[in-house]
Image (cartoon, rainbow, N blue to C red):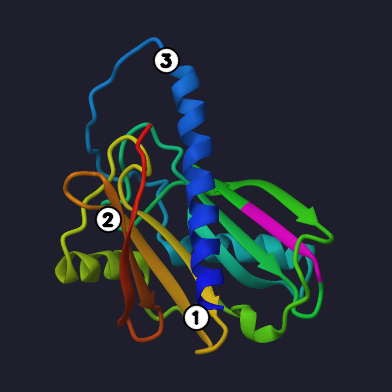
Amino acid sequence: MKKIFLLLFFCVFLVSCQQSTDQDNTMDSNRESEVAFFPDTEMSLTLKEAIEIAQKEALKWNKEAMLYSGNSVDKDKTPTGMEGRRKHWNIEFGIPGKTDFYLVTIRDGKVGEKAHVPNGFEVMPKNYFIARVEEFKYDTPELLKKGQKITKIYPGDTFAKGYNFSFTKDPQKNIPIVMVIGWDQDKKNMIYLKFNAVTGELEEEFEKEQYKN
């Protein structure tokens, strides 16, 4: 079960990065640009702020909607996330005991597209979902700082730019999990720091080799 949830993290996060990278490469194929690190703008949101915005939309769709998972989306031209904030997010919702899947996208700090897939999930019990944003006692700015003290983690430059973030629920421990994602110094391996969002404690640290475009 643990491997399944880690695989879900990788798939959702890397697909988001790849889609954005492909789009950027198409638009910028005939020009070169220097990598620069810019501070986040007023449109950037922490994980909890993004969840709060998305949850309001999900509850309009269905009052029984609960958080399932989510991640920042690598759509910025330059690396961001240095302060634990991102402008673009995908937040996923479901309903315990039902197969409904509901996606709320956040683009430039505001609600973007929304999608309902009636049979998007397998039937799952309540312990796979997060009821309220208040269950997250720690937010991404705090957890990024913790991660930087624990290990040497660097922002990405061309793929998975800056620092990225994701969350899900650990159904066995019944806790929300937040993942801080960055790179090693050589930009060859992605570093994943998995935090308990209730206590702020590091649950797991691991690296995964990736290829930059």
As drawn, 130 above or below 16? below
Quadrant of residue 204 in the image?
bottom left
Q: Which residues are drawn in magenta? A: 99-104
Distance from disc 2 to disc 3, alpha carbons, whole Å, reads 30 Å
SS at badge 3: loop
Answer with the quarter of the image where residue 94 lies.
bottom right
* 207 relative position to 101: left or right: left
Across and down, in percent, residue 180 comes to: 34, 63
**Mark 3 belongs to which amino acid?**
Ser
Mark seen at residue 13? none
- Image location (x, y in percent) of residue 171: 57, 84
Residue bearing mark 1: 134
Q: Are marks 2 and 3 in contact (CB under 8 Å)?
A: no
Between the residue at mark 3 and the residue at mark 1, the CA separation in whole angstroms equals: 43 Å
Mark 3 or mark 2, which is nearer the start of the sequence?
A: 3
Q: Is residue 207 above or below residue 32?
A: below
Amino acid type of the residue that numbered disc 2 sits on in the rendered structure: Glu
Q: Name the kind of residue labelled 1 in the image.
A: Glu
What residue sits 60% from the left and 50% below the top?
A: 105
Q: Residue at x 52, y 45 (%)?
A: 16
The location of residue 104, given as percent across then percent down, is 64, 54
Q: Quadrant of the N terminus?
A: bottom right
- Which residue is at 54% across, 77% downward? 169
Mark nearer the viewer, 2 or 3: 3
Q: How many marks?
A: 3
Q: Earlier in the sequence, mark 1 or mark 2?
A: 2
Residue 79 relative to residue 101: left or right: left
Task: Return the mark for residue 29.
Answer: 3
Are circles 1 and 2 on residues that touch, CB within 8 Å? no
Q: Which mark is residue 83?
A: 2
* Crowding at mark 3 (Cα within 10 Å: few <14, some 14-19, many 20+): few
